[in-house]
Image (cartoon, grey):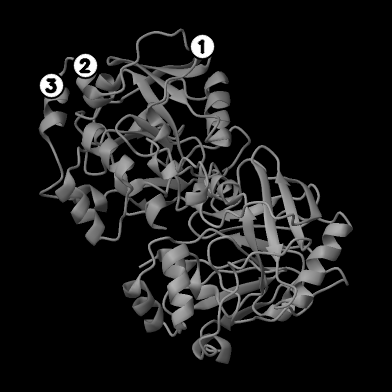
Amino acid sequence: MNKKFLTLAVCGLTAASMLTACGKTFTETNTTEGESSKIVIGESEADTKPAENVEIVNFTAPENGDTIVEINFKDYGTVKIRLFPDYAPTACDNFTQLIEKGYYDGLTFHRIIKDFMIQGGDPNGNGTGGESAWGGKFDGGTNPALAHVTGALAYANSGSTDTNGSQFYIVTGEHNIDDTLFTTYEGYGYSFTENQKELYKQYGGTPFLDGNYTVFGQVIDGLDVIFKIQYTATDANDKPLNDVVMESVKLSKYNGEPIKWTLSDYDYENPEDATPLNFTAPEKGDEIVVINFKDYGTVKFRVFPEAAPKASENFIELAKSGYYDGLTFHRIIKDFMIQGGDPEGNGMGGESTWGGSFDGGKYYNLIHAAGAVAYANSGSTATNGSQFYIVTGEVYDDAGFADLAEKGYNFRDTVKEVYKKTGGTPFLDGGYTVFGQVIDGLDVVFEIQKTLTDDDDKPLADVVMESVTVEEYDGSEIKWYISDYSTDDAEETDTENTSETEENTDTEIETTENTEETTEEITAEATTAEAE
């Protein structure tokens, strides 16, 4: 079951909306009136009683001379979209008038959810703004001939199509839709025609949105650009950590150029097939972090400012200020992780370089492999501070991943291969900001995890960071894996696996709010980035 189907939906013009599990309900908070209301999806006539099996026109080619839309995304490329004025006349009229005014030029895509959609068109850049070409809202309606297949263009709304404005989204969606998934959808009250099912099986998309949003266009070129954009790193509110900017949005004419409906039509390297970024070497001269542990030795790790910019900056600036010097690792769990960075030494303190908490976001291709460095939080990446942990974990095999799959976790093959080789804590992926990877001294980390602890996992003898400094990488040898070291741990890690037990999925990583003097805990059963 796709968890996005249960937990996510498109933000409306003046509201932040979320589809809740089982009840298919949006919780809408009106930003102008401060009122809260609930809108049920799946109980309207259009949603539960689909129209007759009409032909769906998303994949009909435009004719020469037809108006098309060209969106030029900074750093990504150009996307071309055909419009359907015969099926969604008011929606197309609104969009073309806004484009002619230059309304969208320079605006950002403020909400991106992998395998779902990318959303933009808000001049406020946060989902709370925007208006139609005529001012205020308009009703674009729905047409059963237009579906939420991959590449579809539609308006975001605040619960009904009469709240359309300027915000729009482009569907990426799921691509493993089959009869089993449709049966699941139907169990939640959704109904689909045979034509809908056939197209979704072939092209993918977000079928559960049909009947509730105004679809009015379809990507005819640049679908690969859309898919590249959906992999950008985002914060806890799905806002990109680096702006995704529409440099220009203009109208042009279709001149018979080739149409590319699907990703297979492009020379596209799917990021899903890429090995996680953790084990890419730093360039000579890049900043690395050096932690000198009293009585243990030195650990060096690289940071990933290209994928975790705020998280990397926070740690670098704290280290340069001497913040971490003399602090302890207050929580250690063998075959899981070691945690430190709290000036209180008990998990109750710490703050970011900017004061308080910050949102470091998450990037799908930084994972919790052994040696990964990540921030502890109090339930979301928006509560990151100074506390961090270094993963030790366990080695996984197919049986171990089968056990995780039964608990609702799913991982792509390239991720599984890393965990089979290095070990780690895959069940933490998607819940925490990973921002670094140990490049030397992993044996020190594995030695520290043997430290005797009390019932609260606090070391009986202090594990002290004598100094934490920032240096330039000098090109010296990198040792990613514990097998690169001559230690007992190397032998243990090569033979251990999780095919018999999954005890660590019940282990918690915790930070606390000093002002409340209570412990806030986050479970290690956070959903993986691939299974959200």
Q: Is residue 173 above or below residue 22?
A: above
Q: Earlier in the sequence, mark 2 or mark 1?
A: 1
Front residue (pair 150, 262)? 262
Task: State the residue at coordinates (63%, 35%).
Answer: 354
Task: State the residue at coordinates (25%, 60%).
Answer: 407
Task: State the residue at coordinates (52%, 35%).
Answer: 307
Q: Secondary structure at mark 1?
A: strand
Q: Where residue 58 sits in the image (x, y, percent)?
A: 60, 69
Q: Circle 1: is it few (<14), some (14-19), or many (20+) Cα within 10 Å?
A: some
User: Quick one: quadrant of the N terminus?
Assistant: bottom left
How far, Cα to Cα, is label 1 from label 3? 31 Å
**Callout 1 amino acid:** Glu
Q: Circle 3: is it few (<14), some (14-19), or many (20+) Cα within 10 Å?
A: few
Query: Cβ–Cβ below 8 Å for labels 2 and 3?
Result: no
Task: State the residue at coordinates (10%, 32%).
Answer: 495
Is residue 143 visible in the rendered image? The answer is yes
- Position of 340 with respect to 7 (left or right) is left
Q: How many marks?
A: 3
| Residue tagged 2 | 485
